[in-house]
């Protein structure tokens, strides 16, 4: 099994009702994130992923780090 390089960035849930959608026809969930422009390189790494599946880990951080 090949392991990809870790992609890490700061994000928050946008202040919209549809930021988390649960269910739907496929019974899966969808999460939308706001990512600051300073982390654009990490977002570009997501676009370049070859695997459609990856693990997500969330860590709470202080507001001052955004």
Image (cartoon, rainbow, N blue to C red):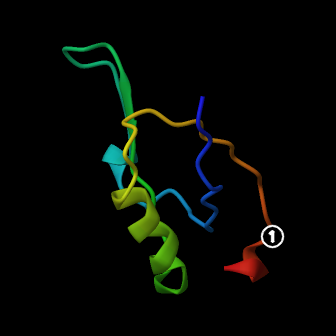
Q: Going 31% across and 13% down the picture, which residue do you hit? A: 27
- Residue at mark 1: 62
Q: Going 52% across and 37% down the picture, which residue do you hit? A: 54
Q: Quadrant of residue 51?
A: top left
Q: Give above or below for 56 relative to 59.
A: above
Q: Going 61% across and 67% down the picture, which residue do you hit? A: 9
- In this image, 62 relative to 34: left or right? right
Q: Quadrant of residue 55?
A: top right
Q: Residue furthest front?
A: 1
Residue 13 visible in the snapshot = yes
Quadrant that contains the N terminus: top right
For mark 1, give the secondary structure.
Answer: loop
Decide: few, some or many residues near mark 1? Use Cα within 10 Å; few <14, some 14-19, many ≥20: few
Quadrant that contains the C terminus: bottom right
- In this image, 18 relative to 63: left or right? left
| Residue 39 placement (x, y as % from top left) | 53, 78
| Residue 19 placement (x, y as % from top left) | 39, 48
| Residue 22 placement (x, y as % from top left) | 37, 25
Q: Going 36% across and 56% down the picture, which residue do you hit? A: 16
Q: Nearer the viewer, residue 1 or 50?
A: 1
Q: Residue furthest left?
A: 25
């Amino acid at each position: 099994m090949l392991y990809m390089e870790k992609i890490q960035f700061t994000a928050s849930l946008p202040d919209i009702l549809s930021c988390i959608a649960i269910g739907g026809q496929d019974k899966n969930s969808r999460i939308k994130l706001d990512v600051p422009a300073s982390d654009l390189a990490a977002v570009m790494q997501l676009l370049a992923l070859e695997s459609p599946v990856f693990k997500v880990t969330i860590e709470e951080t202080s507001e001052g780090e955004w």
